[in-house]
Amino acid sequence: MTDQHGGAGMTGQSGTAVATSPKTGEMVVVEDLRRTYGSGETAVHALRGVSFAVPRGELVALKGRSGSGKTTVLNLVGGLDTPDGGRISLDGTDLAGLGDDDLLALRRDRIGFVFQSFGLIPILTAAENVGVPMRLRKTPPREREERVELLLALVGLADHAAQRPGELSGGQQQRVAIARALANRPDLIIADEPTGQLDADTGLAVMELLRAVVRSEGVTALVATHDNQLLALADRVLELRDGRIVADS
């Protein structure tokens, strides 16, 4: 995948240069990641030394029971939470070297998030929901409208642009959410149980769409799911148990 952001570094809204690591073939590198919630006897050790790398342009799935650490990994890689130990780099940028403004810019410009609950704004149309990230980035209106039209066509919803979330099925809402995640041409898509609220057939269709998007848009995807049928569509599967990776296949 061509690096559309220039060199190995990153400059956020603050204009401050941040620490970077040498470029490799991996989009995501996680080393000895640890995260504990609480303290003392009630402490929950969510991650206990997790390490893995995700090459550019691959869809990697995280599997494991509830509480295994999947969501914690996604939140840390996505810059939504901070680890207690270990290291995370995204396209050569060490997240530990980013300030708040730089992390905000990273999440806005380089990561697309897809959640189980869809997360669409009820009063906005499908097209308006897809356009929200570009409005935040102050993308010119004409460019924004063209990108929205392209993305809705990509996810098969060109004829539903004017409909609001309440007028769409669950599968259609998740397709809008995927289009929104792609709005700012991210390097990485993070999806946490994206088919959790969908029936089996619709969930499979959404996962196939995610895989197709990874190929067509040249992005990398990290997806948490417990559905074995969906895991078969991933390039690679990491299994977590009690905060550790126990299988990599």
Image: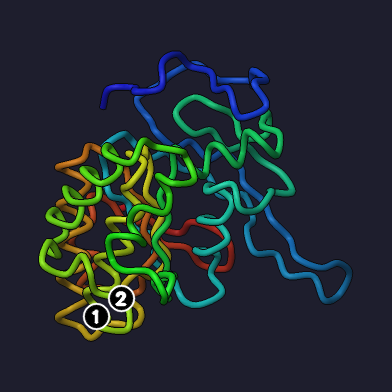
Question: From the viewer's perspective, is residue 224 above or below residue 80?
Answer: below
Instruction: Examine the image and state in which quarter residue 26 appears.
Output: top left
Q: Amino acid at mark 1?
A: Leu
The label shown at residue 113 is: none
Question: From the viewer's perspective, is residue 26 above or below residue 180?
Answer: above
Contact between labelled residues 2 and 1, with CB atoms less than 8 Å apart: yes
Q: Residue at x 30, y 74 (%)?
A: 195
Task: Write down the residue under mark 1.
Answer: 168
How many labels, in total?
2
Q: Is residue 210 left or right of residue 36?
A: left
Q: In x, y percent, where is residue 164?
A: 30, 75
* Neighbour tally class for label 1: few under 14, some 14-19, many 20 plus, Cα within 10 Å: some
Q: Residue at x 67, y 36 (%)?
A: 101
Q: Secondary structure at mark 1?
A: loop
Q: Residue at x 34, y 22 (%)?
A: 3
Q: Is residue 171 left or right of residue 131?
A: left
Residue projecting furthest to the right? 40
Q: In x, y percent, where is residue 142?
A: 27, 39
Q: Secondary structure at mark 2?
A: loop
The label shown at residue 164 is: 2
Instruction: Examine the image and state in which quarter residue 44 appears.
Output: bottom right
Indicate the colouring scheme: rainbow
Q: In x, y percent, where is residue 129?
A: 36, 62
Question: From the viewer's perspective, is residue 112 above or below residue 195?
Answer: above
Q: Amino acid at mark 2?
A: Arg
